[in-house]
Amino acid sequence: MNKLFRIDQCLKLAQRWEILKTISTSKFIPNKLEALKRVLSYRQCLKETGFYIDIGNVCNSKCIFCSTGNKNRNGCAPTEKGHFMDFELFKKILDYLEKQHFLHTNNNQMVALYNWGEPMLHPEFERFMDYITRKKRHISLSTNGIFLPKFSDKFDASCVSFFRLSMCGFSQKSYDKIFMSDFEQCKKNIASVVHEFRAHGCIGYFTLIFHVYQFNTHEIKAAAEFARSLHIGFWPVWAFLVDGERALKYHNRELPVDYLTLMSQYLFHGSHPRGPVNTCSFTDICINPDGDLNVCVMFPKPIGSLFNMTPESLQAYYATSEFCKTCKAAGVPRIQCEDNDEFDLPSLSYFL
Ligand code: SF4
């Protein structure tokens, strides 16, 4: 049994223990049996269509390989600056998704409150959480740890099933290159997120997503130890171009030389470890802060109002979309489609 596998097993056991402790002691979980059933349904959730409702396409990081981060780093027109979703619109969206049977009544689908933004930056984050928690939906969250809001005593995190905590390395030097933020503060915030959410009844899985770049492989071990100290999962992934427009340009050989140089210096695999992929099995639903559907998680490109779509018309769109044809012809599809950005076991065991 290799070292990574042992760490993975320990983390899973430690995290399961934390979840059981939370179920048995939290005031936010009155029905213990229901909570146990919920934990058992997590595996099923991963097989179902996912929903990405971007409650704000606003981010505080400056990741060079993400379209939002790039705008933050290089500046953009006021019209391109992100904004937050209106709470009334959010309610309408959830109700519509249920009415049109995008969302099933069995509650085994995951609703992620992010796509291109940092969800906890939303000034009414708790209000959104409260509404979706009352519907007993599985919630997925993600954060870079740069900002941690203050939570009220009544904040209920019991429906958060998955929480992705992203790190771009484990030193200030790495953070200066990508997030351009204070590493120690992020580390502190990530630890606080885990403790705060557990204290507010979260019985979901936390995973530290470590983005592997050429410059931070020697930091993998310290990050894995950090995850272990918090009793959370550790999931290193190859960093890559999570920006559909630039990925399209990369495959069509239209990216400027300075950007290509940075890619060759920072990333291991050009655009993506698996190279061009010409098929797409994307099925998730991505909704932007205006209530429009985006073509997919890779492209912040609206294809029309959600309120004019049904599951059937959306399927028809993907079957005939000229944009998807161009994307596939260029070899871009990957995230959620043909993705496999996981760091492989032999590579990781080498670094641990
Ligand atoms: S073909 Fe491209 S644009 Fe269309 S859904 Fe797949 S990845 Fe997105």
Image (tube, grey):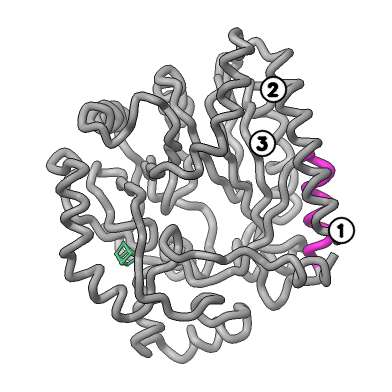
Name the magenta segment's main secondary structure.
helix
Q: Compute the Cα span from label 3 to label 1.
A: 32 Å
Q: Secondary structure at mark 3?
A: helix
- Pointers 3 and 2 in contact (C-beta within 8 Å): no
Looking at the rendered image, the quarter that the C terminus falls into is bottom right
Residue in view at x 86 percent, y 61 percent: 2
Residue in view at x 46 percent, y 31 percent: 125
Single out the residue that lies furthest toward the top: 30
Q: Amino acid at mark 2?
A: Ala
Q: Which residue is mark 3?
A: 193
Query: In which image quadrant can residue 97 be found?
Result: top left
Q: Amino acid at mark 1?
A: Met
Q: Which mark is residue 1?
A: 1
Image x and y of residue 139, in percent? 49, 33
Q: Which residue is mark 2?
A: 199
Considering only vertical position in the picture, is 6 above or below 214? Answer: above
Q: Nearer the viewer, mark 2 or mark 1?
A: 1
**Label located before the other in sequence (3 or 2):** 3
In the rendered structure, which segment of residues is drawn in magenta?
Answer: 219-231
Name the foreground residue: 286 vs 174.
286
Indicate yes or no: mark 1 CB to ligand 1 under 8 Å.
no
Residue 89 on the magenta span: no
Name the foreground residue: 45 vs 58.
45
Residue in view at x 57 percent, y 46 percent: 143
Q: Compute the Cα span from label 3 to label 2.
A: 10 Å
